[in-house]
Amino acid sequence: MATRRIISQEKTLLEKDDRIGSSPAASEKSNITPAVPASVIIKLLAFTFAMIVIPIASYFLTVDRLFKGNSTYAGATAAIMANVVLIGYIIVAMAEDQSDQENEKKGGGGKAEGKKDL
């Protein structure tokens, strides 16, 4: 026959206290800062909105008024406008990356800090 083990004196996982040496990181506060700055997210959302609205608006504004019903030219205009928005996003992203690199060179730190070695 099998015997039962009496476990009334052992602590369960919920009763154990993690702050007493069981984990070296348990006493440190966790870093809850976002991985991407809010300004980057706002720029991305703005360019996403522009990528949707500008080509569609340019198509419908030019199909009857400028090109007198020729949807081929209006579609080409919409494609060109989509490329304009995309190039604008690339230019803004490159300018932001260059400013981050300049901040690192001047005084170190800034937004783009690397992880510390353990």
Image (cartoon, rainbow, N blue to C red):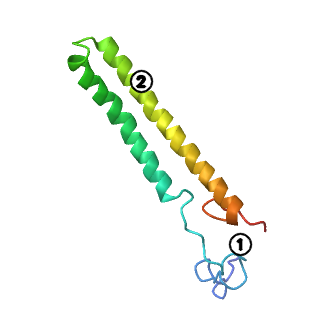
The mark closer to the camera, 2 or 1, is: 2
The image position of residue 108, as x and y in percent, is 69, 65
Q: Nearer the viewer, residue 37 or 76?
A: 76
Assign the C terminus to one quadrant of the image.
Answer: bottom right
Mark 1, other Cα within 10 Å: few <14 / some 14–19 / many ≥20: few
Assign the N terminus to one quadrant of the image.
Answer: bottom right
100 up-or-down from 74: above or below: below
- Tell me which label, 2 or 1, sits earlier in the chain: 1
Q: Quadrant of residue 60?
A: top left
The image position of residue 113, as x and y in percent, is 67, 62
State how far apart marks 2 and 1 are (Cα): 79 Å
Would residue 115 appear left or right of 34 to someone viewing this image?
right
Q: Residue at x 60, y 53 (%)?
A: 99
Residue 47 is tagged as: none
Q: Residue furthest right?
A: 118
84 up-or-down from 74: above or below: below
Q: Quadrant of residue 30?
A: bottom right
Q: Residue at x 22, y 12 (%)?
A: 69
Mark 2, other Cα within 10 Å: few <14 / some 14–19 / many ≥20: some
Q: Residue furthest bottom?
A: 9
Label 1 element class: loop
Residue 80 is tagged as: 2
Do the residues bearing badges 2 and 1 touch, measured as CB atoms within 8 Å?
Answer: no
Would residue 39 appear left or right of 3 to someone viewing this image?
left
Going by the numbered disc 1, the residue's amino acid type is: Ala
Label 2 element class: helix
Number of numbered discs on residues: 2
Going by the numbered disc 2, the residue's amino acid type is: Ile
Would residue 101 appear left or right of 79 to someone viewing this image?
right
Q: Is residue 72 visible?
A: yes
The residue identified by callout 1 is 2
